Image (spheres, grey):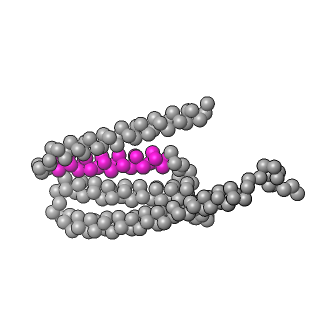
Amino acid sequence: MTDPSPPRAHRKPQAERTLELWLFRARWLMAPFYVGLAVALAALLVVFVNDAIHEFSGIATMSAEKAILMVLSLIDLSLAGNLLLIVIFSGYENFVSKIDTGADEDRPSWMGTVDFSGLKMKLIASIVAISAIALLKAFMRLAEGEAVDDRMLAWLVGIHLTFVVSGVFLALMDLIASKAEKH
């Protein structure tokens, strides 16, 4: 049997190995962040349930436009929840430790495959979708005849376009980086 350790001439000093070990272990300092995000997901669930109960209580007298606004609000909260799950799972698996779900058939197929670049793209796509829903809700209110502040509408459009342009630039940067890695 051969010794897998490098020859004595190439071994790192003990202080360097100890430092690297502790730096590697420091990744566990991120775990409380992901626990906090899981608590935020639970809080988002409470908000979702409260909104759903409030909105569903008036469903019998709701106009089609109000129903669409209600659905958009609930979808908005759902997208935020999906975003939290993506960040929790991908962040934990990329930076702390692999999540062992055993042979659980419910494990999402993307778990363990989303790297930092993929996480970035999913994050910006979710933010763009959430922004688009906020913009659509404002336009729906405007179409219903509600007073919508022009300045607020301009800000919503500007912010949405900023997110879209940022997403395009992030995708282009990833494309350029992936082509550079191939060379």
Nearest the eye: 116 or 47: 116
Q: Quadrant of the C terminus?
A: top right
Residue at point 19% right, 56% down? Answer: 66
| Vertical side of 119 occupied by 35: above or below | below
Res 84 seen here: yes
Nearest the eye: 52 or 44: 44
Q: Please state if 120 lies on the left or on the right of 151 as rendered.
A: right
| Vertical side of 85 occupied by 10: above or below | above
Residue at point 51% right, 55% down? Answer: 90
Q: Quadrant of the N terminus?
A: bottom right
Across the whole image, how many numbered discs are drawn on residues?
Answer: 0
| Vertical side of 160 occupied by 21: above or below | below
**Residue 171 % position (x, y):** 45, 38
Q: Farthest residue toward the top? A: 183
Nearest the eye: 52 or 123: 123
Prevailing secondary structure class for the magenta stretch in the rendered image:
helix
- Residues rendered magenta in the picture: 118-142
| Residue 29 sits inside the magenta stretch | no
**Residue 133 % position (x, y):** 29, 49
| Vertical side of 166 occupied by 99: above or below | below
**Residue 93 % position (x, y):** 55, 57
Residue at point 84% right, 56% down? Answer: 3
Q: Dividing the picture into quarters, in which one does residue 5 lie?
A: bottom right
Residue at point 69% right, 58% down? Answer: 15
Q: Please state if 76 lies on the left or on the right of 98 as rendered.
A: left
**Residue 11 % position (x, y):** 77, 52
Res 56 seen here: no
